[in-house]
């Protein structure tokens, strides 16, 4: 069982890392920045997570686990699932983009779960991958930069998922 102070430090480190990555992007955040923001020593971060990649994996795992739990419990239709995933990607956009640009592999299991769940809702693995392709962080960032609103993108993603599901 984890000691109370270790659990507090872990939570503080993950919260600080998530916030700093969201504000600055992953490239502009150092382990030292995270340690300072969390109120712990740099050695605490290294002992707990190994290195920056280990810290990023832990942040990704934490955010993905919370999204998967929500999606599994609340989503009954393809559009609902896609809309919930869009909300997660948008809320975590800098982190999602950072993961897409690196070799962080911790979310592969979560991705597989997402594909399987979505494939059941839309009728095939290919259709699930089609929806997920438009939910890539870099794609959403591009659409936002082109002047589309988050609401327009979300509505389009939901419409796509519902259309694919209706073709089952």
Image: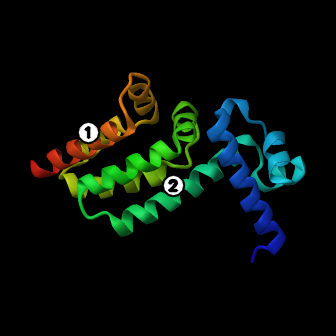
Residue at the image point whose x is 46% and y is 44% from the top: 89
Q: Which residue is mark 2?
A: 64
Q: The N terminus is located in which quarter?
A: bottom right
Q: Is residue 155 left or right of residue 71?
A: left
Viewer-proximal residue among 150 and 21 = 150
Does residue 73 sit above or below 98 in this rendering? Answer: below
- The spot of residue 119 in percent (x, y) is 25, 53
Viewer-proximal residue among 7 and 119 = 7
- Characterize the local packing of mark 2: few (<14), some (14-19) or many (20 or more) Cα atoms within 10 angstroms: some
- Upstream in sequence: badge 1 or badge 2: 2
- The spot of residue 88 in percent (x, y) is 46, 50
**In the drawing, what numbered circle is on residue 156?**
1
Residue at the image point whose x is 29% and y is 54% from the top: 118
Residue at the image point whose x is 51% and y is 35% from the top: 100
Instruction: Using the numbered discs, state the Cα–Cα distance from disc 1 to disc 2 in whole angstroms.
Output: 23 Å
Residue at the image point whose x is 37% and y is 65% from the top: 72
User: Callout 1: helix, strand or loop?
Assistant: helix
């Amino acid at each position: 069982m984890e000691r109370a102070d270790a659990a507090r430090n872990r939570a503080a480190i993950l919260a600080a890392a998530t916030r700093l990555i969201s504000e600055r992007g992953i490239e502009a955040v150092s382990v030292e920045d995270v340690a300072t923001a969390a109120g712990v020593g740099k050695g605490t971060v290294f002992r707990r997570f190994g290195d920056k990649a280990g810290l990023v994996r832990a942040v990704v795992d934490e955010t993905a686990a919370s999204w998967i739990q929500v999606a599994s419990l609340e989503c009954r239709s393809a559009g609902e699932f896609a809309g919930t995933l869009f909300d997660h990607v948008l809320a975590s956009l800098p982190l999602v983009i950072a993961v897409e640009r690196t070799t962080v592999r911790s979310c592969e299991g979560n991705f597989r779960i997402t594909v399987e769940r979505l494939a059941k809702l839309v009728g095939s693995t290919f259709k699930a991958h089609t929806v997920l392709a438009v939910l890539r962080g870099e794609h959403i960032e591009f659409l936002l930069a082109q002047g589309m609103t988050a609401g327009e993108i979300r509505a389009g993603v939901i419409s796509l998922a519902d259309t694919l599901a209706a073709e089952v």
